[in-house]
Image: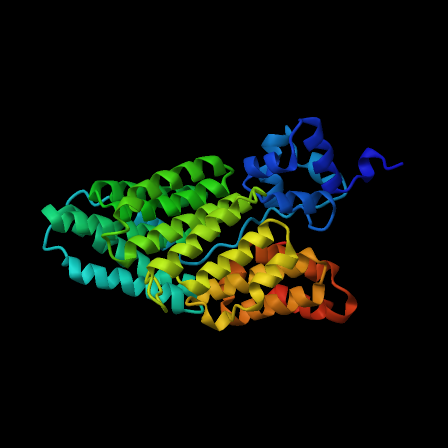
Amino acid sequence: MTTEQQLKPGQRVERLRRAVGLSRERLANLSGLSATTVKFIENGRRSLTLRAAQQMAPHLGVRDLGDLFGPSVALSLGGRASHPAVDEVRRALTAWHLALDGEPESTDYLRGAVDSAWQTWHTSRHQRTAAGEILPGLLLATQRAARLHSGDDRRTSLALLAQAYHLAQAYLAWHGDRELVWLTVDRGMNAALDADDPLAIAQATWYAAHLLRAVGRGDEALERLREARSLIEPRIADGGPEWAEILADLHLCAALTRSRTGDQGAWSDWDTARSIVDRALPEGFVGLRTRVSRPLVNVYAVMCAVDLGDPDEAQRRAHALDPASIPSTERRGRHYVELARSADLEGAKEATLHLLARAEATSPETVRYSPAAQDLITRLSQESPASIRAEAVDLARRMNATDL
């Protein structure tokens, strides 16, 4: 018989979950994890990380994490890796310019600067370093313009300011203070609302929904996404491709949100997004800031299948998707991480390591700051067979896996 002290962390999670009367899906939704992650933690196929334990603990009635890890597990309190430019971005976000003078940059100039910043984010192999250099100046310029312009130019400046905050959110999403991420979401939404621009509001909602999902408020995220779609849908027929682009992106976000809670309804939202892209966007269309495109829709299909715990479907969806066709280096790196997660679901450690190495070669910073990639690398370095362990440890050292 297994004594209380001999229980593994996953067994402890399952016992506590049952004791408080939660299903795996409900615990996942409350904790901001996928139902598959909770399942695999409980059955031992995935290690319980400190981050996951902290997310689940309040909903399991746990105040001492030793109740989850047991007395024999040493915990590293080093925290998440943080990017060196976070302090400069924080200063830019929390600077209040009480007095401004001079002439603001023109809206045409600012639009070019914002578009260039997003292009850099999607094409650089080291997108966080590149964004960290751009963001302080971009935030200041768009903040000044929103304050100093008037009339239509002010509304346009506010919509561009919202985009600058969205880029800051993308930069901060996997590192830095959670409060800073909330700040970018709130500032971005307020700027979009002040601009009174449905496209800007819808895109701000897309970014807000990702954060709501990450903190276990998936139902709220879906409701906000429904509201945003109601702003866009009546304008699709008479609007340009950017309206269809944003509508498809909202459905893709809803699909991912549903899949993270094990809801097979994710495929309905995904199929709607695919239909919009196929029907309403020109062949070869790629959204400048969103990267919405036919390849991106297929990337989301792989992500949904992985989150739904279906590696066979993930591999089927990925079979015809050439990674080189994905119009974003950052997204391509994340796609390789998703394929690595799929291989991990099947216990294929060699394939998992190979795919993580491909992700690193594509976008090192995506791997270095992705919690999912870091978890995979850490476990591979500790649990791989001897034939690949040295390679796994080397990758973990290069990518600064935090639990080594």
In depth, the one of 181 and 201 nearer the eye is: 201
Q: Is residue 96 left or right of residue 393?
A: left
Q: Residue at x 40, y 54 (%)?
A: 170
Q: What residue lies at 42% left-to-right and 41% top-to-bottom?
A: 179
Instruction: Give the image quarter of residue 276.
Output: bottom left
Depth check: 365 or 17 in front? Answer: 17
Residue 401 appears in the rendering: no
**Residue 358: percent from the left, percent from the top?**
57, 70
Colour setup of the view: rainbow
Q: On screen, 150 above or below 218?
A: below
The count of marks equals: 0
Give the x, y percent position of residue 177.
45, 45
Relative to residue 373, is residue 138 drawn left or right?
left
- In the orientation shown, which residue stands out farthest toward the right? 1
Report whether residue 167 is seen. Answer: yes
In which image quadrant can residue 261 be found?
Answer: top right
> Where on the picture, by quarter, is residue 385?
bottom right
Q: Image check: 311 left or right of 214?
A: right
Q: Position of residue 52 (x, y in %)?
A: 60, 43
Q: Position of residue 345 (x, y in %)?
A: 68, 55
Query: If the image is split into quadrants, where does the C terminus sit?
Result: bottom right
- Give the quarter of the figure containing the N terminus: top right
At a point 10% along the width and 54% down the height, the residue shown is 102
